[in-house]
Amino acid sequence: MIDLMLDETGDIDFDGVDVSVESGASVVAQRLAMRLSIVKGAWIFDKNFGTPYYQNILGGKFSPTILNAVFLDVILTPPGVLKLFAPIEYSFDRRTRHLGMSFSVKTTTGVTLPVTIP
């Protein structure tokens, strides 16, 4: 499968002449970043796409077990992901209330791909 690539701002990567497309490991990283950054139910074309932040993570009692289970399910969902290498490492900025994470996945092509969601 070939995907349109996004630049660092989230726009379609366009150099003025061509749109960037990719089918390698960078596509898997992009798919993961997109799924983890979109709240489940927010995307008009697929209400099941994204991460169930409101449904399972925010507003309730914090549970590392639930957090890991939710993220594991989201990480293993995109095409191209075969396996998650545990554990997921989290970084949380209390001032901005921003959660970042890093992990590695094995792709279906056999590549071990490190992924960082800042």
Image (cartoon, rainbow, N blue to C red):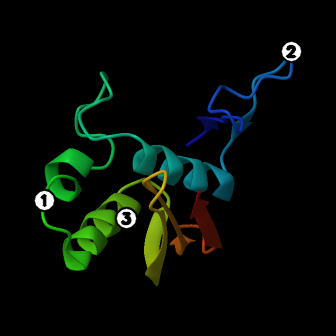
Binning the other alpha carbons within 10 Å of mark 3 as few (below 14), some (14 to 19) or many (20 upward) gives some
Q: Which mark is residue 60?
A: 1
Q: Identify the residue at image location x=60%, y=75%.
A: 110
**Quarter holding the N terminus?**
top right
Binning the other alpha carbons within 10 Å of mark 2 as few (below 14), some (14 to 19) or many (20 upward) gives few
Give the residue type at disc 1: Gly
Q: Identify the residue at image location x=71%, y=39%.
A: 8
Tell me the distance, in whole angstroms, between the alpha carbons under discs 2 and 1.
46 Å
Q: Residue 102 carries which label?
A: none
**Quarter holding the C terminus?**
bottom right
Q: Residue 16 carries which label?
A: 2
Locate residue 53, reporting x and y percent: 26, 50
Callout 1 secondary element: loop
Q: In which quarter of the image is residue 86?
A: bottom left
Q: In this view, does 96 lie above or below 49?
A: below
Give the residue type at disc 3: Leu
Which of discs 2 and 1 lies nearer the camera? The answer is: 1
Disc 3: which residue: 76
Locate residue 68, reporting x and y percent: 30, 73
Tell me the distance, in whole angstroms, between the alpha carbons under discs 3 and 1.
24 Å
Callout 2 secondary element: loop
Q: Tell which circle, 3 or 1, labels the residue nearer the N-terminal end.
A: 1
Q: Can residue 34 be seen in this view?
A: yes
Q: Which of 22 and 48 is in front in this view?
A: 48
